[in-house]
Image: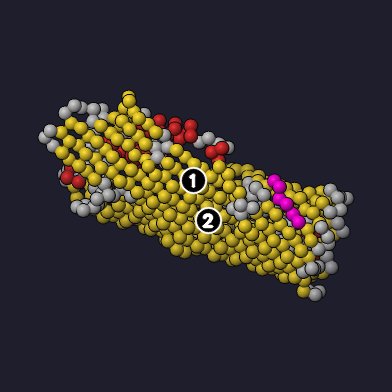
Amino acid sequence: MKKYLNIVLLFFTIILYAENKISIFEGGNHSVKSHLYLKNPFAKNRFYTDLQKSPTGFTVNPANLAFVKTKMFEIEMTPSISLNLNNLYDPQSKINGIVDDVLDSFADDNLSLNYPKTSIEGGQKGGIQNFAMAFPIQNYGALGFSFSNDFHFDFNYIGNGMGGVLRDSTNSEVTKVAMDIDIFSNLSIDINKLNLGFGGKIYENLTFGTEIGWLNSSFDGNFDAQFEGIIRQYSESSDVTFIFNDAENFRNTLDDSIRINLNANALRFTTGLNYQYEKYLFGLSFKPKTKADLNGNFQIIQHTLGALNTDALTGDSDEEMVNATLFELSKMTYTNRTEYTGKNIYLSYPAQIEFSAFLQAAHTEFSVYYSKFLGEYALHYECDIYENGREKNEDGEFEDYEKHSEKEYDFSIKPNHLFGLETNFHLSKKLILKIATQFLILTSTSEKTLFVPFLDTDLTYNFSNNISVNLGVISFPNPILKFSTIYNF
């Protein structure tokens, strides 16, 4: 947002001296709506008793399917929750501070200022988030199937009405500026997973399983910044008008846009073993590394003024925001164009080895586990960059130019270790309190070590031997609230 506030001020300084001041500034109206669903990727059923009654445990270790004795299915849902975050957190003071900082050196003593008005809504995506089934195959073992929405994020932003008026401070000449910026942005990210698995006994106390997972990731987004502006400078002897977004004679738009439509599919295999000794159960599972190509379109189009110092615009330089010597007087509003076109974009997933142990005591069950990751979660992005416009040469003359280049970027997070503890407390014959905690240790792109906690607290009520209902009451980071039902038949 600060960038576009600076662009507003840039309009006001194109043909003006330092003593010119902004007399009216309109912050406009801004609406933000966002919803999130994040399934804890590490909290799964690891208890021996759960493995006999729930079909979801095979996604951690497919050897768990060997413990399935009856046909069963499970469905998990989350309610849709939307909150007006303005009532919980007041962002207005921070936004007002940003506006004051930007206007500090431009504001008139009698400035008429209307700060941006914001509306922020956030919450949880509702709907069916997981569906799983398991079928025993006589004495051979069992088959498992599950479909889950592991991650959803949507974001919508509308900003309009930013504008203002500037008057020249001299008596002989009047300069007026009228402009408006509208911004529209939306982004949707979905990660879904389909799992098929089989598990059975090898020996009396040893089980083996294998599972194949189809992981689908989709990214869809649009961003449009639309600028309209008129600069009029007049006196008794002259009257000059400069108009943006009027390409009758030459390109003079400052509109920016981003288009994202990417989709990736990956296959993830898992193999696992379980060994049972009296009340103890020990497990071992392995997932190899996986790579998924992102197919589709990723395009960024940007228009800038040649006299604009973009580093100063974003706060990365102490130099002046505008170099007036780079304006071409006959084409004051001419803009240069840069287009970024994505290619060879892919996601990488690390390998994972997990060790687990289960212990059953009186009225309490414990499951501890440790995962070692080999590799990193990474996004690789390459793009072609095409630039065209006008620039000043060594002789001080303006000439057309065209440039083509390529760049590549890598963004990664390297998980190192995961430690987990899950506990079942049997509060009564029918009521069970489940608490799952995990600590993920990872390394960021900047080589900083981060500790990420996860928490799931559930209450399970067994209505009968066939039906149980689970209520997720406390989870971090998400979901806020969830329900699931398991039916055995």
Categorize mark 1 by other alpha carbons within 10 Å: few (<14), some (14-19), many (20+). some
Name above or below for residue 403 compared with residue 327. Answer: below
Q: Magenta segment, which residues? A: 469-474
Name above or below for residue 343 compared with residue 326. Answer: below
Q: Looking at the image, which residue is at 39% across and 51% down?
A: 224
Determine contact: label 1, label 2, CB under 8 Å: no
Residue 111 in the image: x percent, y percent?
A: 34, 28
Categorize mark 2 by other alpha carbons within 10 Å: few (<14), some (14-19), many (20+). some
Q: Quadrant of residue 139?
A: bottom right
Return the residue found at the far left. 237
Q: Where residue 189 is drawn, which disc sits there?
A: 2
Based on the picture, tell me whether residue 193 belongs to the magenta stretch.
no
The amino acid type of the residue labelled 2 equals Ile
Which secondary structure is most common in the magenta stretch?
A: strand
Q: Looking at the image, which residue is at 43% across and 54% down?
A: 222
Residue 417 in view here: no
Q: Quadrant of residue 300?
A: bottom left
Based on the picture, tell me whether residue 473 belongs to the magenta stretch.
yes
Decide which of 107, 67 is in the foreground and name it.
107
Q: Looking at the image, which residue is at 84% across and 48% down?
A: 427
Decide which of 465, 388 is in the foreground and name it.
465
Q: How many marks overall?
A: 2
The mark nearer the N terminus, 1 or 2, is 1
- Dot 2: element: strand
Label 1 and label 2: CA atoms lie apart by 16 Å
Q: Where residue 32 is drawn, which disc sits there?
A: 1
Q: Is residue 417 left or right of residue 224?
A: right
